[in-house]
C-alpha cells in the first residue's frame, strides 16, 4: 500500500472514530435530570421499586429524578430513596387529584414541610382533570376554572407558590386553554418555575406551546408519548424546532406496566430517547440543554 493510500485509510478511520465519538457524546445521559418518573410502591402496578429506579439511574450517571405518583405526595419517598441510594438527587411532589382533596393548599403546605425539603413539584390535576366526557357522564373531577376564569383556590395556590420560589408548578392534565391561563396567572404572582406537562400528549399545538414558552414556561416532551403510536419522534422534533430547544425539557414518564407492552426501564429509556433525538439532528449542545440544563433550572438547581 502506498503512503498516500495508507494516509487515506488512516484519515478515514480517524473520521469514523470522531463521528462515533460525537454520537456517543450526544447520547450521553450522564448529568441528565429526569423530571417525570413513576415507581413502586403505588396504588397501580409499576415496573420497578423506587430505590431500584434510583440505583439504575445512578449507575448510568443520571444526576437526578423527580418521582411522581398521581394519588399521593412523594416528598417522603424522595427522602427515603436518598438515604437508600446516596449520590443521586431525588425529588418528589404532589399531584392535586381527588385523593389529596383536589386543589388543596394545606396538602401542598404539608408536602413542602416534609423533612429534607425534597418535595419540589406541584402538578395540577392529572387523572382527575376536567374533561367534557367526565362532565357528560357524571364522573367526579377536579376543576381549575369556571366560565373562563381560574377558581379562587387555584389563585390561592399560585400566591402560595409565588412566596415559595423553590417550588415548581406543572400544569398536569388540564386543557391547553386552562394551562395558558394558569401560566399567565402564575407568572403575575411570582411563580418562577413553570412546566407544561407532556404538552403534545395532551393536544397542545405549536402556537400554544410557543405562547407558554414566551411566558417563561418550559415545555415537556416525554419519551413515553412517542411509544404508543399516536405521536412519533419526528412529530416531537418538528415541534421542538419551532418552540426552540431553549424552552424544552426531555423526560421519560416511564415506570408504567401497560398491557401487552414492554417499555424500557427509566435509565435505558432515557438513553434510547436521546439516541432517537440525535438521529433526528439534535446536536450535543441541544440535547444537553433539554436533558440537563433546562430541567435543572426548572427545579431551581444550578446546572452542571
Image (cartoon, rainbow, N blue to C red):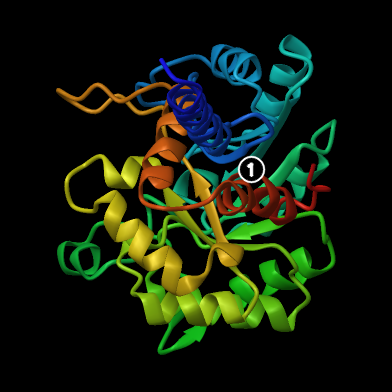
Report x, y in % for residue 42: 46, 24
Residue at the location (68% across, 32% down)? 64
Residue 53 is drawn in which quadrant? top right
Q: Quadrant of the N terminus?
A: top left
Q: Can residue 151 be seen? A: no
Of residues 166 and 135, the one nearer the viewer is 166
Q: Going by the image, does 36 lie left or right of 194?
A: left
Could you tell me which residue is drawn at 26 percent across and 40 percent down?
A: 227
* Residue 128 on image: x %, y %: 38, 54
Q: Residue at position x 43%, y 89% from top?
A: 148
| Residue assigned mark 1 | 93
In the image, is residue 155 above or below residue 196? below
- Looking at the image, residue 291 sits to the left or right of residue 20; the answer is right
Number of labels in the image equals: 1
Q: Nearer the viewer, residue 156 or 1?
A: 1
10 Å crowding of disc 1: few (<14), some (14-19), many (20+): many
Q: Is residue 159 left or right of residue 136?
A: right
Amino acid at each position: 500500500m502506498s503512503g498516500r493510500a495508507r494516509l487515506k485509510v488512516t484519515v478515514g478511520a480517524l473520521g469514523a472514530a470522531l463521528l462515533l465519538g460525537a454520537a456517543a457524546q450526544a447520547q450521553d445521559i450522564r448529568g441528565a435530570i429526569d423530571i417525570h418518573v413513576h415507581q413502586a410502591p403505588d396504588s397501580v402496578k409499576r415496573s420497578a421499586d423506587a430505590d431500584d429506579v434510583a440505583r439504575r439511574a445512578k449507575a448510568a450517571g443520571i444526576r437526578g429524578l423527580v418521582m411522581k405518583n398521581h394519588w399521593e405526595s412523594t416528598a417522603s419517598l424522595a427522602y427515603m430513596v436518598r438515604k437508600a441510594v446516596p449520590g443521586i438527587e431525588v425529588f418528589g411532589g404532589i399531584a392535586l387529584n381527588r385523593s389529596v382533596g383536589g386543589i388543596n393548599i394545606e396538602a401542598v403546605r404539608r408536602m413542602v414541610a416534609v423533612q429534607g425539603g425534597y418535595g419540589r413539584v406541584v402538578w395540577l390535576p392529572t387523572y382527575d382533570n376536567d374533561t367534557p366526557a367526565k362532565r357528560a357522564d357524571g364522573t367526579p373531577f377536579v376543576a381549575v376554572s369556571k366560565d373562563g376564569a381560574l377558581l379562587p383556590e387555584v389563585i390561592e395556590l399560585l400566591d402560595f407558590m409565588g412566596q415559595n420560589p423553590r417550588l415548581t408548578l406543572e400544569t398536569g392534565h388540564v386543557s391547553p386553554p386552562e394551562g395558558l391561563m394558569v401560566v399567565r396567572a402564575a407568572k403575575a404572582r411570582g411563580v418562577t418555575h413553570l412546566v407544561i406537562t407532556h404538552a403534545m400528549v395532551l393536544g397542545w399545538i405549536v402556537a400554544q406551546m410557543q405562547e407558554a414558552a414566551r411566558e417563561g414556561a418550559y415545555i415537556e416532551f416525554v419519551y413515553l408519548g412517542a411509544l404508543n403510536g399516536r405521536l412519533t419522534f419526528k412529530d416531537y422534533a418538528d415541534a421542538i424546532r419551532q418552540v426552540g430547544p431553549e424552552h424544552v425539557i426531555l423526560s421519560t414518564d416511564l415506570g408504567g406496566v401497560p398491557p401487552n407492552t414492554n417499555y424500557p426501564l427509566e435509565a435505558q429509556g432515557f438513553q434510547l430517547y436521546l439516541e432517537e433525538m440525535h438521529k433526528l439532528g439534535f446536536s450535543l449542545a441541544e440535547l444537553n440543554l433539554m436533558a440537563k440544563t433546562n430541567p435543572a433550572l426548572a427545579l431551581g438547581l444550578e446546572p452542571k
